[in-house]
Image (spheres, rainbow, N blue to C red):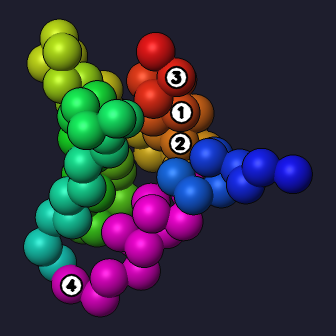
Amino acid sequence: MKNSQLVAIIKRLEAMIEVATSEVQVRRFEREGKERCIVSFDAANETFELTESDTQQVYQFDDIDLVAMEIYELLQD
């Protein structure tokens, strides 16, 4: 059985939340060496911000599951 990509994405997002600092945490998500999106987590507001690399469109999320699903969709394209 193949490992879940969604679980791996959620683990990376949870690591952003668990960092005990007030600095904004940033992660890049790539597929086959091509950056698909950049995600930042602002601990002060407890929000994620996802920027699509191709369109530079920005989305904000306050739910880890929703941002994980969006990242998953971008990685499937």
In this view, 12 is above or below 34 = below
Closer to us: 26 or 75: 75
The kind of residue tagged 1 is Tyr
Query: What is the span of residues highlighted in magenta in the rendered image?
Result: 10-21
**Is any atom of residue 37 visible in this view?**
no
1 vs 2, front mark: 1
Prevailing secondary structure of the magenta residues: helix
Q: Please name the residue that numbered disc 2 is placed on.
A: 68
The kind of residue tagged 4 is Thr
Instruction: Report the disc number at residue 72.
Output: 1
Mark 3–mark 1 CB contact (< 8 Å): yes
Where is residue 3, by image quadrant? bottom right
Label total for image: 4
The kind of residue tagged 2 is Ala
Label 2 packing within 10 angstroms: few (<14), some (14-19), many (20+): many
2 vs 4, front mark: 2
